[in-house]
Amino acid sequence: MNSMSDLLKHLYKEKKIRPLDYQFAKQMRSLCGGNLDKKEVDLVMYISALVSYEYSLSNICVTKEKAEELNSFGQSVVQENIRGLLPDPKDWDNVISSSGVFGNGNEVKPLVFDGERFYLYRNWKMETEVSNSIRTLSKPKCLSKKQLINIKKSLDKLFARNLDLMAQKVIEASGSLSDEKLFGNICELLDVTEENKKRIDKKKLINLVKSEDFQDNLNKLSTIIPESYCINWQKVSAASALTRQFTVISGGPGTGKTTTVSKLLAALIENRNTDDYTIKLCAPTGKAAARLSESISKAMEELPIEKGIKGLIPTEASTIHRLLGAIYKKADFRHNRKNKLHLDVLVVDEASMIDLSLMSKLIEALPDNAVLILLGDKDQLASVEAGSVFGDICGFIKDGVSEKQKEILDYITNYSLPIGLESNDFTDALCVLRKSYRFHKDSGVGQLAYAVNSGKEENIAKVINKGFRDIDVIDLSNESHRKFLNGVSDHYSEYLEHIRNNEEILKVLTSFNKSRLLCATREGECGIKTINEKIETILESRGLISRSNTSAWYVGRPVMITKNDHSLGLYNGDIGICMRSDDGKMYVYFEAIDGGLRRFLPSRLPINETIYAMTIHKSQGSEFEFTYMLLPDKMSPIMTRELVYTGITRAKGSLKLCCIRQVLNKSSRLITTRSSGLSEALTN
């Protein structure tokens, strides 16, 4: 091919790149200065198309090193065609600086080159603003001795050892456990660190626990195992958040993120310096917001605080879009840098789902003195849109803290925290909850999730072969596939029977949401399009649903909204079920965040799809009592460790996984990587 324009046109016609990529490159060519020769103009077109193409793959930027490899647009065959069209890489910097379309960020140009990476200007600006804001927010507060004393009092009350509950658990298990296992259980219950286990008088502890008057002498337990021997990472995370404006709390399912943040909010309120104190809760999707609301409400019931304090802790979360005030049919929000949010504390759950664009909008609308708390699981999938903000931030998590932070945290927690090498103000703001209260050592779901995260085939095989009661891994075949779908349909029969018996609508919705089939892909024999059709066929053959030839709607059809409609208050991820009302009309019913009901005529709904099976991506922010997961029969680019881990950890009770072992093993070895400069920007 004679020119880059010809090559890009060919790729566009072959659908290897988007029309947008091709047109953007042509536009950049038209903006080039007249002092460039043909090869130099071709270089501008090449980089422009590449940056646009990579953004469509969720990459914020393209490194110069990758661009110079020339193995671009996912096409190895392109490499030789490109090589002869471009100038020598050693001359690229001169071409870029004289092209007229690249800037260094100090001036507004369509593209930015920072010496190492190529960006669309908009993406460079968002990344820069997010990194600058996070670094500023990460600086610790200047707290007086009196303030530290008050924080310590709040934490001691909120995270007090529940020795009565611990004693009850120990007594229940003591008869069936050896002394060694009993010792291990007690240490686990009290969060004793490994190095401090050696300091405990094991014989004295066991004799106390097995004595008849154990419950009357619980104070002796604290003498044998003082609090300084332990580290409750929930308490540490809350303590860290109380000493700064910005905190990240990462933890897997069941590690108590919402329990931690509930206690943290209570402590913030107890130590506020004003009566006008506003806390807001939000999450990326309606489902995640509903779960956050439910979790906070439950945690609040057990908090040892005054009613007046409880009354100031919100129990209703909103979507981020609703919080910011989404404007109908516009990409802008009512709240922005010129019209800040009215709040003192903002808690954002499922932060791993937030892309760079939305994170930048959220941070720019944050008041200057507001506290920002991000909750999430660093091992989950990154956002659907470009960027991996939460993952980039959590990449700096250290095992210890700086000496300065250790001094403060040791005082207000009564622990002795480890010092982390190269820890600083930013890394001190990053906390990890390390103990799972849901997935203990006897949980197959938890052990399988950990094994997948290890990326080691032998660890996965060991868990599968151990015979855990809560997991069932089935080898995928035509016969097992058929039986698997029939088993899924058995669970869905329950909510359909509730509809047939005219039971309460909330009961129907609750019943449906107990189970879900998760798929990795949309297309193919194991994709949601095919699987939803097969489940509908099974349910219809059982007489549980009756589909129409003229409409997609039928009584019992479950749907998920796939496009936000701010005017209706329906958002991507909201799930409803079609049922008849007393007047005989069909409506789609949704559970509201406050626990009530909302209904809409099917014709009024925004874009939606049937949801017996949903993608693992869409399941983020949800959990199911009975979780089914189906992996494809061959590898694809989306099959990664994060995807499989996210699917497994949606299981609250049991997991049934149908897959080919080779696909499961290969997926666990592949880690999602996205190009961005955020990590480097956060440390500069």
Image: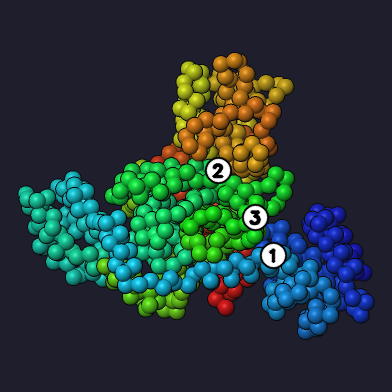
Q: Which residue is mark 2?
A: 286
Q: Which residue is mark 1?
A: 123
Residue type at tag 1: Asn
Give the residue at the far top of this rendering. 583
Residue lying farthest to the front in this orientation: 275
Quick check: 494 left or right of 568?
A: left
Q: Is residue 149 above or below residue 597?
A: below
Q: Residues within 10 Å of mark 1 (few under 14, many from 20)?
A: many
Mark 1: which secondary structure? Answer: helix
Q: Earlier in the sequence, mark 2 or mark 1?
A: 1
Q: Position of residue 578 (x, y in %)?
A: 59, 26
Q: SS class of the residue under badge 3?
A: loop
Q: Which residue is mark 3?
A: 385
The kind of residue on which mark 2 rests is Gly
Q: Residues within 10 Å of mark 2 (few under 14, many from 20)?
A: many
Judge by depth and name the residue closer to the eye, 278 or 468: 278
* Distance CA(mark 2)–CA(mark 1): 26 Å
Instruction: From this view, report whether residue 185 is shown above or below residue 40.
Output: above
Q: Is residue 102 visible?
A: yes
Mark 3 or 2, closer to the camera = 2
Q: Quadrant of residue 234?
A: bottom left
Q: On residue 63, which mark appears?
A: none
- The image quadrant where one finds the N terminus is bottom right
Left or right: 253 in relation to 136: left
